[in-house]
Image: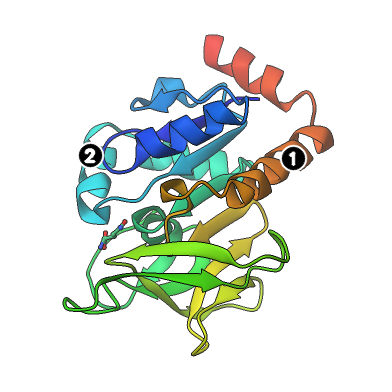
Amino acid sequence: MRVGVLALQGTFIEHIDILRQLGVEAPPIRLPCELGTLDGLIIPGGESTTMLRLMESFGLIEPIRDMARNGLPIWGTCAGMILLVKDVSNYEMETLRLIDAKVKRNAFGSQVDSFEVDLEIPLVGEEPFHAVFIRAPIIEETRPIVQILSRLADGTIVAIRQDRLLACAFHPEFTDDLRFHNYFLNMVRQKLSHNPEDRILRGSQLRL
Ligand code: GLN
């Protein structure tokens, strides 16, 4: 299994380390030609506007959109989540526009902009998940097609899934708890078991 990590800026090294611990090939992705043989992609935390600008200059936006439309599992953490959703309520920015949700950037304000909390995320396991929020966004609105995976105690939505796209407002790459990564890898495995020939096809398209 090969799960690429967008490596333009942000927490890509942390994601790559965890994927390698889990025995997954985890190439850093910087160029469109590196996307072709992936079974999944992670967009890390960082600064969404910087990442977006770099994605534009490296010509990554349309290729990633196309691969998502073709069913590539993609997971965005924090800034990565901002890049995946259709709308950002408090900034003008043209995201990848893949998940039917609206987020608010830097939603916890400047004083209390970082915190840690134990979250209930039933789909990753019964034990609470220790979640690290750093100048985090929140999810303000979702369309019915979007599955809500976790909320803060006050009801604020902080993790969502739409088909093969996963997004969370916090940073599982900053903890030793590998359950969220495992959850994403299971999405990738499911996709591979539905279309085993997919990888070979994508590989051969790239060579053409
Ligand atoms: N505040 C950042 C943004 O809006 C996200 C922060 C993060 O990824 N930790 O892009």
Secondary element type, mark 2: helix
Residue 208 shows in the view: no
Q: Nearer the viewer, residue 27 or 143?
A: 27
Secondary element type, mark 1: helix
Residue drawn at point x = 53 percent, y = 23 percent: 36
The answer to which of marks 1 and 2 sits earlier in the sequence is 2
Q: Residue furthest left?
A: 110
Identity, as a three-letter code, of the amino acid under mark 2: Leu
Q: Where is residue 186 shown, x and y percent of the image? A: 72, 43
Distance of mark 1 from mark 2, alpha carbons? 29 Å
Q: Nearer the viewer, residue 78 or 131?
A: 131
Residue drawn at point x = 54 percent, y = 16 percent: 206
Q: Nearer the viewer, residue 39 or 195?
A: 39
Q: Which residue is mark 1?
A: 191
Number of callouts:
2
Residue 37 shows in the view: yes
Q: Where is residue 48 shown, x and y percent of the image? A: 27, 54
How busy is the neighbourhood of tag 1: few (under 14 within 10 Å), some, or many (20 plus)? some
How busy is the neighbourhood of tag 2: few (under 14 within 10 Å), some, or many (20 plus)? some
Q: Residue furthest right?
A: 194
Look at the picture and state if 132 lies above or below 197: below
Identity, as a three-letter code, of the amino acid under mark 1: Lys
Q: Nearer the viewer, residue 61 or 37?
A: 37
Look at the picture and state if 17 lies above or below 185: above
Q: Quadrant of residue 24?
A: top right
Q: Which residue is mark 2?
A: 54
Q: Residue furthest bottom?
A: 154
Q: Quadrant of ligand 1?
A: bottom left
Q: Where is residue 56 shown, x and y percent of the image? A: 26, 41
